[in-house]
């Protein structure tokens, strides 16, 4: 019997049993988000209703990165199962005897991975606000979620945090470690799963993974890669056993990997090429800036102006363009300095990553004001 994709929705603590039942039936679970508008539910159900599921597919995860339309990524059971032992070892997890706190909704691929791990004997999942959440010893989520957890002084028994999904800065690591929390930050993608791990000495290949930088682009040979997409193609490309999602990267003489973001997000301004991730990392070091999204504003003759929307840190005074320009001048070469500034609370994806596409929409419609 051919497997079907079954779209699930409901409270996070109820979905675990629903996912188990779908997997036991030999079908493929695809978890939606109750916050979606009706049109998005309709689109996902239309896409999956009569879908031809490739042989071996066991999991379907939604991904939109920080921009673009959500895509359905299909993967085998083995593509996640093969990493369970490594993840348990890194977490020092004692199987189902421990609880892992999952702040991102189950529609997020990082949360779905931890639910799959729990079905395979890994730590028991618990969600914020659920009974026993404050007794969790492990955490898997984004930097934004870890910051919120630390600020709220929640989960006092937390001892290890597995953090992925977006940039992880040194200040957050230092804060977590000062509270006795061991931090494992990783780079990965819904299509590739775990790629590289940083336990405090920089990103290095995750156990079982080989990495290679070709013409500035990161390629991966991994047993954890997905099968591909359902419906429209996405950024995943393959070359034999190697795969890439188009992220730019460098590797130093000690083997430390630096991921610079997607090549297709680069801003062409005058004669320079600016990678947003690099500028965003610098902006996060500025006093009073909690987070930032950098993008290009199309402009005649120069191609695009580098622009930034910054999220002020709690308690910081309202930023002005003049102060931000002065601070940026101490961090960036002239071509990389944002010329246009916006400020406000950054919109985020379901998992907590800054939602780049929504920032661009808000700027385009005038929903956020330009700083002067």
Image (cartoon, rainbow, N blue to C red):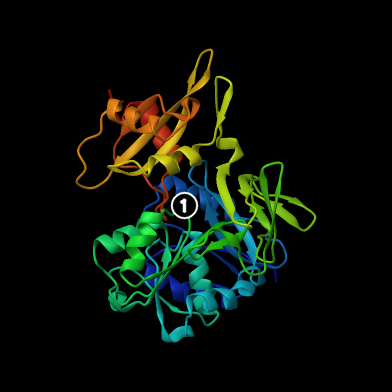
Question: In terms of depth relative to the viewer, which is nearer, 303 or 67?
Answer: 303
223, above or below 275, in the image: below
Quadrant in which residue 344 is drawn: top left
Quadrant in which residue 77 is drawn: bottom right
Q: Secondary structure at mark 1?
A: loop
Quadrant in which residue 222 is drawn: bottom right
363, above or below 270, in the image: below
130, above or below 146, in the image: below
Question: In terms of depth relative to the viewer, which is nearer, 356 or 272?
Answer: 272
Residue 211 lies left or right of residue 324; in this view the side is right
Sort mark 1 into few (<14), some (14-19) or many (20+) by Cα contacts within 10 Å.
many
Whether residue 102 is visible here, answered yes or no, is yes
How many tags in the picture? Answer: 1
Outermost top residue:
301
Question: In terms of depth relative to the viewer, which is nearer, 348 or 317?
Answer: 317
Residue 256 pos. (x, y %): 59, 56
Residue 219 lies left or right of residue 294; in this view the side is right
Query: In which quadrant is the N terminus drawn?
Result: bottom right
Residue 183 pos. (x, y %): 43, 67
Whether residue 195 is visible here, answered yes or no, is no
- The residue shown at (54%, 78%) is 89
Residue 357 pos. (x, y %): 45, 38
Residue 125 pos. (x, y %): 41, 75
Query: In which quadrant is the C terminus drawn?
Result: top left
- The residue shown at (64%, 45%) is 246
Would you name the residue on which mark 1 appears?
166
């Amino acid at each position: 019997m051919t497997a079907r994709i079954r779209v699930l929705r409901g409270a996070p603590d109820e979905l675990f049993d629903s996912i188990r039942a779908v997997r036991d039936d030999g079908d493929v679970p695809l978890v939606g988000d109750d916050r979606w508008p009706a049109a998005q539910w309709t689109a996902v159900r239309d896409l999956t209703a009569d879908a031809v599921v490739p042989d071996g597919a066991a999991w379907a995860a939604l991904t939109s990165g920080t921009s673009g339309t959500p895509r359905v990524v299909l993967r085998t059971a083995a593509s996640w199962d093969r990493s369970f032992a490594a993840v348990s070892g890194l977490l020092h997890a004692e199987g189902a005897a421990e609880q892992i706190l999952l702040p991102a909704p189950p529609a997020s691929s990082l949360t779905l991975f931890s639910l799959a791990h729990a079905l395979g004997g890994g730590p028991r999942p618990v969600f914020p606000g659920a009974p026993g959440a404050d007794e969790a010893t492990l955490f898997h989520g984004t930097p934004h979620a870890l910051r919120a957890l630390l600020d709220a002084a929640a989960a006092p028994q937390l001892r290890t945090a597995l953090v992925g999904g977006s940039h992880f800065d040194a200040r957050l690591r230092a804060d977590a470690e000062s509270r006795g929390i061991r931090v494992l930050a990783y780079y990965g993608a819904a299509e590739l799963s775990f790629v590289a791990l940083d336990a405090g000495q920089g990103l290095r290949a995750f156990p079982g993974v080989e990495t290679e930088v070709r013409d500035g682009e990161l390629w991966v040979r991994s047993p954890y890669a997905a099968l591909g997409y359902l419906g429209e193609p996405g950024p995943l490309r393959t070359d034999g056993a190697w795969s890439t999602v188009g992220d730019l990267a460098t590797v130093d003489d000690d083997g430390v990997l630096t991921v610079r973001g997607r090549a297709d997000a680069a801003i062409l301004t005058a004669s320079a090429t600016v990678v947003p991730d690099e500028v965003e990392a610098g902006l996060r070091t500025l006093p009073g800036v909690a987070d930032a999204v950098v993008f290009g504003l199309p402009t005649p003759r120069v191609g695009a102006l580098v622009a930034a929307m910054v999220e002020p840190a709690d308690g910081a005074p309202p930023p002005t363009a003049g102060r931000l320009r002065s601070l940026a001048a101490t961090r960036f070469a002239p071509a990389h300095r944002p010329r246009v500034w916006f400020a406000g609370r950054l919109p985020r994806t379901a998992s907590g990553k800054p939602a780049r596409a929504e920032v661009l929409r808000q700027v385009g419609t005038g929903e956020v004001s330009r700083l002067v």
